[in-house]
């Protein structure tokens, strides 16, 4: 698995990443969908998330290319922009 080939393939971004006010610190592939998040907790309210073309996010932060092989239902997190990514399966809520 890798990033979609189309620049305009759907991805999700939290409002902070979308508005370029915070870096991507958490990348999630829940159910296969790409989500690029700042790492803070956000309400479930859809106003805190935007649908974007994945290419726009990758152009904003080229270091995200190192996550192109992140499997579905996994996530990767880093402590700071430019930091090392730590990959793990997404915890299952029971």
Image (cartoon, helix red, strand yellow):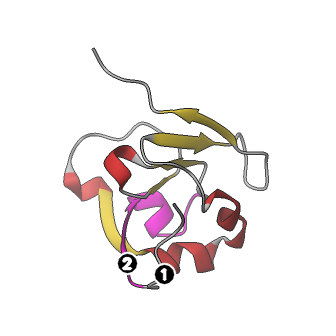
Query: Residue 73's image quarter?
Result: top left
Query: Residue 52's image quarter?
Result: bottom left
The residue wearing badge 1 is 5
Q: Secondary structure at mark 2?
A: loop
Name of the residue lying farthest toward the right: 83
Q: Is residue 66 above or below residue 25?
A: below
Q: Is residue 68 magenta?
A: no
Query: Residue 6's image quarter?
Result: bottom left
At 69% across and 73% down in the image, what residue appears? Answer: 62
Q: Is residue 13 magenta?
A: yes
Name of the residue lying farthest toward the front: 1
The boundaries of the magenta stretch are 8-22
At 63% across and 57% down in the image, what residue appears? Answer: 67
The residue wearing badge 2 is 9
Name of the residue lying farthest toward the top: 94
Indicate which disc residue 74 carries: none
Marks 1 and 2: which is nearer the front?
A: 1
């Amino acid at each position: 698995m890798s990033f979609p080939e189309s620049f305009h393939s759907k991805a999700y971004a939290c409002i902070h990443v979308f508005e370029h006010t915070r870096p991507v610190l958490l990348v999630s592939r829940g159910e296969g969908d790409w989500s690029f998040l700042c790492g803070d907790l956000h309400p479930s309210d859809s106003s805190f998330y935007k649908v974007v073309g994945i290419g726009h996010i990758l152009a904003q932060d080229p270091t995200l290319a190192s996550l192109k092989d992140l499997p579905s239902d996994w996530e990767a997190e880093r402590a700071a922009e430019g930091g090392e990514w730590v990959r793990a399966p997404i915890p299952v809520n029971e």
